[in-house]
Structures are given as structure tokens and as C-alpha cells.
Amino acid sequence: MNAQITLHKGDITTDAEADAIVNAANTSLLGGGGVDGAIHRAAGPELLAECRTLHGCRTGDAKITKGYRLPAAHVIHTVGPIYRDGRHGEPALLASAYRRSIEVAAENGCARVAFPAISAGVYGYPADEAARIAVSTVAKAMAEHPQVIEVRFWLFNEHLYRAFEQALRELHTMS
Ligand code: ADP
């Protein structure tokens, strides 16, 4: 199998190898802070104009737009859950956000897809659990959608990077 998951440090908006970058958006799709703010700033105002035509996105779902001034041709907007205690459906919703993003990427011919750590910022998902769900869900979804050959995780701080490294090690030990 040629599918690969790679880890990167820093700002996802600089990724020039991805066909699509995934935005950890909110249900309005009308912009926010964190990675959402960074993506809208880098893409320019045309991105918000297209987002307005989408009429929001449910938690766990994903919608695609163009990338405008970003190096990536597309942005896939997904909405992760707000973390409460892990017993309010958060794991299933977080997995759904990753799975739907891969499905939308495959439907639109995006072979390389960049992801931030969805829900692991303002939405408060603990890094280790978020990383485990991200890596295992993406690996499964890539096996089902071979059009997607690379998932590139962009981790914004050292703690998250280490959590994703560990989750990848666990995945490789299990397979
Ligand atoms: P959420 O609301 O889903 O938690 P956030 O944007 O608050 O989304 O955070 C998601 C993750 O993205 C966090 O780990 C945050 O540190 C990270 N992040 C913020 N800006 C960027 C960026 N420019 N590139 C990559 N990751 C980023």
C-alpha cells in the first residue's frame, strides 16, 4: 500500500504540496480564530464569500471550497466537536470529521490532504485522545479511498507533535 501519513511542524497555510488543506471551522463556516482565522487570512476575502454560499456545516461533516490565494487548490471545511468529558459523543463526531474530510477529498480528486489537529485547540480535545482518533480514522479512511495517497498532519506545538508521533507508533505496532 502506498498510502502514507506524514507529520509536519508549523503553519498549515504554508503547505505547498497538499491539494487540499482542511480547516477546523465552526458550524457557521463564517470564520473564527485559531487555524480558521489563519486560513481565511492567507486565502483572502474570496474564501469567506464562497463560504457564505454553503449555509454552514454540521458538526462531523465537511464541505469543500477553492483555496484562492493559498498554495493548495482547495480548502475542506470540517467541524469537530467541542470537548466536554468524552461521554457526549465526542469521539464519534471527531472521527466523523476526519472521515468526511477524506471522503470529500476523494470525491474531488485531492490526492494529498493536509490536516490540523481538529478540536485540539479552542474546542479543548485532549491531545493524546485527539491524536489517536485522528491517526486511526485517517488510516482506515485512506484504505477505503485509495485516491488519497498522503495525509499531512500539521502540528502547531511540540506537545501535539509528540502526541501524533506516539499515535502513529501505536498504529504501526497494531498493523
Ligand atoms: P478547534 O476549534 O477545532 O479546536 P483551533 O483552530 O482552535 O480549532 O485549533 C485546532 C488546532 O490547530 C490547534 O492545535 C491549534 O494550535 C492549531 N493551529 C492554530 N493555527 C494553526 C495553523 N496556522 N496551522 C496549523 N495548526 C494551527
Image: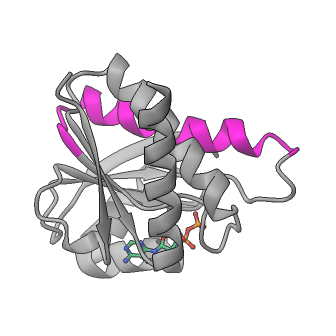
Q: Position of residue 142 (x, y in %)?
A: 34, 28
Whether residue 60 sits left or right of residue 41 in the image: it is right
Q: In the visual, does 136 lie left or right of 126?
A: left
Q: Is residue 106 magenta?
A: yes
Q: Please state which of residues 6 and 59 is positioned toward the viewer in this rendering.
A: 6
Say which residue appears at 71% left-offset and 68% top-offset: 124
Q: Is residue 8 visible?
A: yes
**Image point (34%, 45%), residue name:** 64
x and y, in percent, of residue 24 in the image? 49, 60
- Whether residue 35 is situated above or below residue 148 in the rendered picture: below
Q: What secondary structure characterizes most of the magenta part?
A: helix
Residue 47 location, x and y as percent? 30, 66
Apparent side of residue 22 relative to residue 159 in the rendered image (left or right): left
Residue for point 58% across, 61% down: 26
Q: Where on the picture, by quarter, is residue 175? A: top left
In which quadrant of the rendered view does residue 13 lie?
A: bottom left
Q: Which residues are magenta?
A: 87-112
- Camera-side residue of 62 and 82: 82
